[in-house]
Image: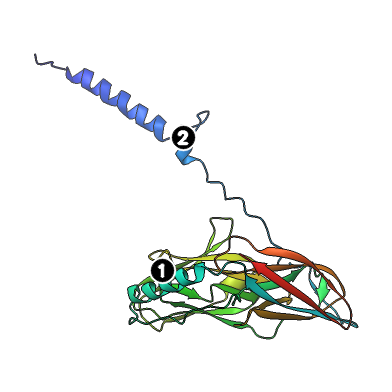
Amino acid sequence: MNVIVAPHARAGMLALLLAQMLIACSPDASAGRTPPASSKARTAPAIDTVDLGGPSYRVVALTSVGSVRGVVTRLDTTALTAADAMRDSLAVECGSPPRKTKRRSAAFVTNAVVWVAGVAAGKPMSEEKRAELESADCSLDPGMLAIGVGTTVNVSNDDRVLHRLLFTREGTHDTITVMPFFNEGEIVPSERLSKMAGVIDVTCVFHPSTRGRVIVFAHPYFATTNDAGRFTIDSLPPGSYTLHVWRSGAARPTNQTVTITAGSVTTAEAAIK
């Protein structure tokens, strides 16, 4: 059966439909209604904050100082072999020729970031204002980069594949900068990463294995462990402080209390997972 709608009836139906569309599109159309869960703002994940100093740090003349030195070791070395094998496979995946990575048998942790928290005043910041971060074999070198506020970071690419690095402030959804790399040998200098103290997560859109952190300090009392896992932090005002150690791949840093005595060297050993 065919239904015939009179012209004046069709006009009325069109007018009603147009009015409903205008109401739905008006700014107040959603007033008083609960938005669906998918449209609610995302809540940033809870992250334990770490003390990296702040604007209140003061440079003062020090009449008496001490220092802390030590070594960082790994409690479990069984994962090193698997990690080395993974690096070999990633090197081939990212365009490098097959090669055999030097195996690490020692338990020393290299490139771990060590710092003293709770120093309100002390020596001036380092005059070194440039650092290097390299994307190589679909990994970041170093995996943990420690810098002071105001440092320019030269980010380079040594792979023959496309990378798109994202630099995001930890615990938020705030992207500080994005760096696409198309060719081997590209270098992008950035001053945006060190505008303020904090932890920056580094990831790659195309390669999940490319992960690292940039840790920005507002004071000069930090160091990175060498190939033997050793570090030294000097010119510390006497007092009791918290010593933090954060290695690449660890979710959070470890900490211990150290006491600095004028004119002496405090020894600290950190055994971490």
Disc 1/disc 2 C-alpha distance (Å)? 33 Å
- Based on the displayed image, in which of its 4 quarters is residue 25 positioned? top left
The 10 Å Cα crowd at callout 2, few under 14, some 14 to 19, many 20 or more, is: few
Q: From the viewer's perspective, is 34 left or right of 115?
A: left
**How far across and down, in percent of the image, does residue 161 sit?**
34, 74
For disc 2, the marked residue is 36
188, 82: nearer the viewer: 82
Relative placement, left or right, of 161 versus 6 is right
Tell me which amino acid carries mark 2. Answer: Pro
Residue at 40% x, 84% y: name it: 185
Please give the label number shown on residue 54: none
Residue 237 vs residue 129, the one in the foreground = 237
Q: Is any atom of residue 102 visible in this view? A: yes
Mark 1 crowdedness (10 Å alpha carbons): few <14, some 14-19, many ≥20: some
Q: Callout 1: helix, strand or loop? A: strand
In depth, the one of 186 and 264 nearer the eye is: 264
Query: Which comes sooner in the sequence, label 1 or label 2?
Result: 2
Residue 60 found in image quarter: bottom right
Q: Is residue 88 above or below residue 28?
A: below
Spot occupied by residue 262 in the image (x, y as percentages of width and height): 89, 80
Q: Which residue is mark 1?
A: 164
**Residue at the extreme top of the image, as rendered:** 1
Residue located at (45% from left, 74% from top): 84
Location of the C terminus (image quadrant): bottom right
Identify the residue at the far bottom of this view.
Answer: 127
Q: Quadrant of the N terminus?
A: top left
User: In the rendered view, does 187 fall on the left or right side of 116?
Assistant: left
Location of residue 145 by image quarter: bottom right
Residue at image point 62% right, 54% down:
47
In the rendered structure, which amino acid carries the disc numbered 1?
A: Arg
Do we see residue 218 in this rendering?
no
